[in-house]
Image: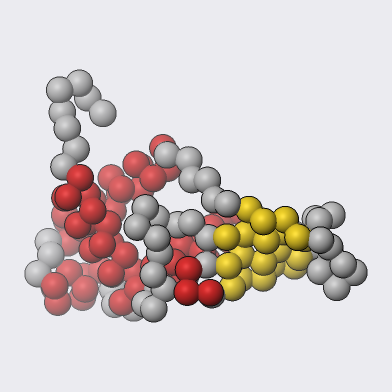
C-alpha cells in the first residue's frame, strides 16, 4: 500500500460480498451486474484487486491429524462451514483443489467465517 493512502475497509467488505454473490448465483457476470445495478467494469476491477490482496496474505487453517487405518490411508477429508465435506483420495492437483474449495465456500447455503476460508482439515497419517 502506498504511503499516505488508506484502504476503505467497508468498501472492500462490500465488494467481497458482491464478488461472492455473483459466484454463488450461477449467473454470468454481465447478467448478475445488470440485475443488481453494479457496473461491470467496477466488478472486474474489484475482483482483480481483491484477488491480489488475497494472494499476498497467507491463509492458515487449523488442522486435525487423525489416526490412519487401512481404510483411510492416503485420504484427506476437508470439512467446510456448514459441515460440507470434500474427500480426496490419492494425488491431486493443488490448484484444482483450491478452485473446488473456492466454489464451495462461495456457494449458496455455505456460510464462510467472517474473515474468509477457514475449513477444518483432517489428514490421515501416512499420506
**Quadrant (top left, top right, bottom left, bottom right) of the C terminus:** bottom right
Outermost residue, left direction? 37
Direction from residue 104 to residue 28 in the image, left or right: left
> In the rendering, at what x and y percent does residue 126 appear?
84, 54
Q: Quadrant of residue 122?
A: bottom right
- Percent position of residue 34, x then y: 13, 73
> x, y (%) of residue 91?
74, 59
* Residue sitting at x 57%, y 60%: 120
Tell which of 5 and 121 is nearer to you.
121
Coordinates of residue 100 in the picture (x, y in percent): 52, 66
Q: Nearer the viewer, residue 108 or 44?
A: 108
Q: Is residue 44 visible?
A: no
Picture colour scheme: secondary structure
Left or right placement of residue 38 versus residue 61 in this view: left
Residue at 76% from the left image edge and 60% from the top image edge: 66
Q: Is residue 111 visible?
A: yes
Q: Quadrant of the N terminus?
A: top left
| Outermost residue to the right | 70
Q: Is residue 19 above or below residue 8?
A: below
Kindly identify the residue that appears in the image at 41 percent across and 37 percent down.
56
Which residue is painted at 40% across and 64% down in the image? Answer: 112
Outermost top residue: 3
Amino acid at each position: 500500500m502506498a504511503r499516505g493512502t488508506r484502504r476503505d475497509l467497508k468498501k472492500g467488505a462490500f465488494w467481497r460480498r458482491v464478488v461472492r454473490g455473483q459466484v454463488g448465483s450461477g449467473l454470468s457476470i454481465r447478467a448478475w451486474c445488470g440485475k443488481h445495478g453494479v457496473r461491470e467494469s467496477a466488478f472486474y476491477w474489484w475482483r482483480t484487486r481483491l484477488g491480489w490482496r488475497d494472494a499476498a496474505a497467507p491463509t492458515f487453517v487449523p488442522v486435525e491429524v487423525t489416526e490412519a487405518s487401512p481404510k483411510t490411508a492416503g485420504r484427506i477429508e476437508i470439512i467446510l462451514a456448514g459441515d460440507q465435506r470434500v474427500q480426496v483420495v490419492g494425488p491431486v492437483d493443488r490448484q484444482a483443489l483450491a478452485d473446488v474449495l473456492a466454489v464451495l465456500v462461495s456457494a449458496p447455503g455455505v456460510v464462510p467465517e467472517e474473515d474468509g476460508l477457514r475449513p477444518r482439515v483432517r489428514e490421515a497419517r501416512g499420506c
